[in-house]
Image: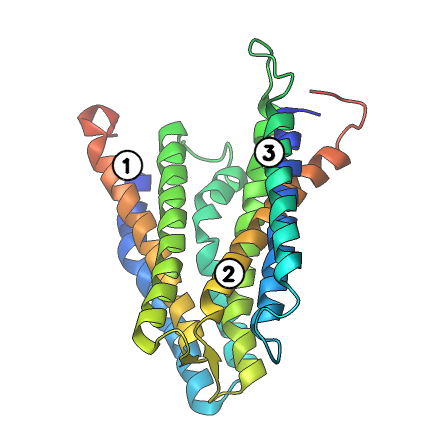
Amino acid sequence: MNETKAESWLYFFLGLACFLIPGGVAVFIAYDRGISFAPVFMFAGIVIWGGLFWLFPFIEKKVRKGKRKISFDERDQLIHKRSVMAAYVVLWLYFVAACVTAWCLVGPHGSISVNVMPLTLLGGLVIFTFVQGLASLIQYSRGGKDGEK
Amino acid sequence: MNRTQKGAWFTLGVAVLLLVFGAIIYAAMFAPGGRTAGVGLLVKVWIWIILVFLAGGVALVHWKRRPSGVDFDERDNSVRKNAVLAAFVGLWILLFAASIIPTFVAGDAGSIPVCLLPIINIGVFLVVMLIYSVAILAQYNWGDKGEKS
């Protein structure tokens, strides 16, 4: 198991908790005490940080270029890009499914609470992270022993 | 103008035309009185404009395309990567805005019509496409203007 694969496992389990727990806290504060700057700022930070966390290996590679042995090679980059693309496709499918589900539940002339919107986005962030981690692990497991370091 | 730029102009045109089309439909949906009063002809004309643009755009993108010539180099690849990154950043900012703005508009205990959800979804998608194509065109514009790839 190379370093990137180990990071994928870590990301798979801890990544979800890292975004889900603070995101849920922010949404709960906004729901309980009303909308204010602090929960909105916290939620914005979590959404943008979580949504762009997939860039971290690329940034790390650029920053630490030449300082240590290569742990994020061409194959890892390809796997990572495919995982992000798969997660992106699933994210859009999730939002389409959310629209259809809401439509079916309350009818075409119904309405939904505004508090559902941040929760839906938080769900999208969790699914994005989950699919990305899962796709990485599947691709590493498909690689066979030749590709393993 | 290379294939990437042609594609970006095409995407930009389609996104703008569809956004205007969506705005017309949206305005008609929530207009007082008859739902489609006075916009039927406008919608038909706009649909024809979109169809003509699509047909013309596809023809222009593939017109005079040399099968043997190099139409996609490293620079185009880099431009596309940066544009995808800009689109991703834009996507998460838009999703955050779409989840928070209804709370400010309708209040903490407010609700929004369920028919708005697909409109928000498609709107976000079109704006992301717009950001992607504008990012591509801006990068070519910032680069060497005399260079033709």
Residue sitting nearer the eye, B42 or A148? B42
Give the residue type at disc 3: Ala
Give the residue type at disc 1: Asn
Residue sitting nearer the eye, B113 or A83? B113
Q: Secondary structure beneath disc 2?
A: helix
Using the image, name the chain to which the residue with label 1 belongs.
A
Identify the mark at residue B55; answer none if there is no mark: 3
Residue sitting nearer the eye, B82 or B5? B5
Q: How is the image coloured?
A: rainbow
- Residue position marked by numbered label 1 in the rendering: A2
* Eye-nearest disc, 2 or 1: 2
The crowd level at tag 1 (other Cα within 10 Å; few <14, some 14-19, many 20+) is some
x then y, percent, for residue A118: 44, 73
Q: Earlier in the sequence, mark 2 or mark 1?
A: 1
Q: Is A112 positioned to the left or the right of B92 in the image?
A: left
Q: Is B148 positioned to the left or the right of A89 in the image?
A: right
**Residue A15 appears in which quarter of the rendering?**
bottom left
x then y, percent, for residue A83: 35, 42
* Residue at screen point 48% across, 47% down: A55
**Residue A108 appears in which quarter of the rendering?**
bottom left
- Residue position marked by numbered label 2 in the rendering: A48
Q: Are marks 2 and 1 on the same chain?
A: yes
Using the image, name the chain to which the residue with label 2 belongs.
A
The crowd level at tag 2 (other Cα within 10 Å; few <14, some 14-19, many 20+) is some
